[in-house]
Amino acid sequence: MGAYDKELERWLTRATADPDLIEELESIKDDEKAVEDRFFKSLEFGTGGLRGVLGAGTNRMNVYTVGQATQGLADVLNAVKPDNAVAIGYDSRIKSDRFAAHAAGVLAANGVRVYLYRELMPTPMISFAVRRLRCDSGIVITASHNPSKYNGYKCYDRRGYQMTDADALATYNAISKVDLFDGVKCMALDEALEKGLVSYIGDDLIEAFYEEILALQPDPGIFDEVDLKLIYSPLNGTGNKPVREVLRRIGVKDLRVVESQERPDGTFPTCPFPNPEIRQVFEEGLKMTADFPADLIIATDPDCDRVGIAVRHDGAYQLMTGNEVGCMLTQYLLERRQAKGTLPEKPVIVKSIVTSELIRMIADDFGGETANVLTGFKYIGELVEKLDNAGEADRFILGLEESYGYLSGTHAREKDAVNASMLIAEMAAYYKKQGRDLTQVMAELYEKYGLYLNTLLNFVFEGADGMRKMQGMMDDLRANAPRTVGPLAVLSVSDYLTRETADLKTGAKTPIDLPKSNVLSYALEGGSGVVVRPSGTEPKIKVYLTAVAPDAEAAQRLTDALGADMKAKMGIEE
């Protein structure tokens, strides 16, 4: 008899709202390992909300785990005050619309007013709605750039950024008390609409979002002077309408959309990993360049909060990394605002701890301040909120993460690929007017500041065994801190869980003024470095490598050496 047979039987009896779940459970009920994977734990609600594989069980995304999370959220909101409101949005993923409707019904049954988008919308538009409609929270049903078998549930606080640690813990504790079959109140969406507990968000709010984005143009009118040929792909997600509309309004005339990736489709038929970090998602767009030699290809992920680009250079297309785009945007925004006399004193750039330090060097040249925060755009949003509350919102120039997320305005507290697509297009047009493409601009930055090669290694460990392996790796690195990585000595180790940096030469320890996080960072000789962290939203352990070298070949050799040594130290075999 299996350890989870009783829970399996309960689900077979009770999970009748979705026939897909019963069919799935019947098909695996004699497979003990498959049953364990679905029930060995509940999806954990953290600062990133919920994320998991679609399917039956407590360790899957389904109407019951969505309902349980929403009931917990409603309980937290109602315990603080009456008359709460929540904005809800969703992307193109499988069952996203159903999960959004179910969440709306649960909130309505708990007396919480709901503002629901009529159709799929980018994640930053939910952050915008939370703030503009003065909501107490926000929900987005999305798994961002994960493969199609995933879905998720992002949760925002009243300030428009994803919950930080204290709020997420309070919500997690409330969710843990909710029985997912008997403890969830719910009413049908039609009934909630009829009673006025749920209302659809109108076109006026969408227009207000567009106007906020357009107000952030660095070079209005640039497309009257420059003909930029552009290919855009929403990767079957939410960016199709808003990105195209904003690009049309700023004057992009020569725009073509990747037809096979244009319409919403949660199976992502031409891009099984709909992540603009990888070349495969650009293949359909690259095919179009045979007849349409675009200067630039832009791709946004399914919930349109991340954006990647490919740039035409000498007849071939080069993908630019998230760090490179971030460096160029930093340079471009500071440069243009300085030229126009609109650059404030002490402009602020906010980046994550794993994002390139080259950005700090660029900002320094403009008298800027660079703030480092933990990975997770909520920490960037939190700092933007602090600037806003202090009356210093104008100092905020750009928030960015190496994982292709950017924000240049205070309209949202979330990375915004609608905003970023506009900035990138205008930046490409501005430099094209000067006879340069973006690969040349980046080469000039490397020549000026030094070559920083930033590489991300992802290692996937799925299921219960995978979780144990990843934790074991982090435990072993903490117990056996490396003195060298590849050919370089380790100068210091920063442990964001203990919130201390240890100097390996002197033994001195200095505090880290950031929240606790399961992250280890190694500062190496010559400005190079390594950061290791388990992903908060995927079954991955991530290793970030920074190689600082005089030229590209030397940087790649150093990167290879650092990566090989870290894999050996962590016991990773490929």
Image: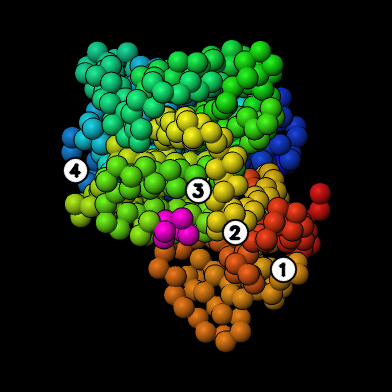
The residue that appears at 45% across and 24% down in the rendered structure is 226
Distance between the alpha carbons at the discs numbered 2 and 4: 54 Å
Residue 540 relative to residue 242: left or right: right
Say whether marks 1 and 4 touch (CB < 8 Å): no
> Circle 1 sits on which residue?
485
Q: Nearer the viewer, mark 1 or mark 2?
A: 2
What residue sits right under mark 4 in the picture?
81
Q: Position of residue 572 (x, y in %)?
A: 77, 56
The relative height of residue 7 versus residue 396 in the rendered view (above or below) is above
Q: Is residue 47 above or below residue 155?
A: below
- Identify residue for label 3: 327
Q: Earlier in the sequence, mark 3 or mark 4?
A: 4
Mark 2: which amino acid? Answer: Gly
Q: Which residues are magenta?
A: 360-365
Q: Amino acid at mark 1?
A: Val
Say if the magenta span includes residue 363. Answer: yes
Q: Residue at x 56, y 35 (%)?
A: 437
Q: Residue at x 28, y 21 (%)?
A: 207
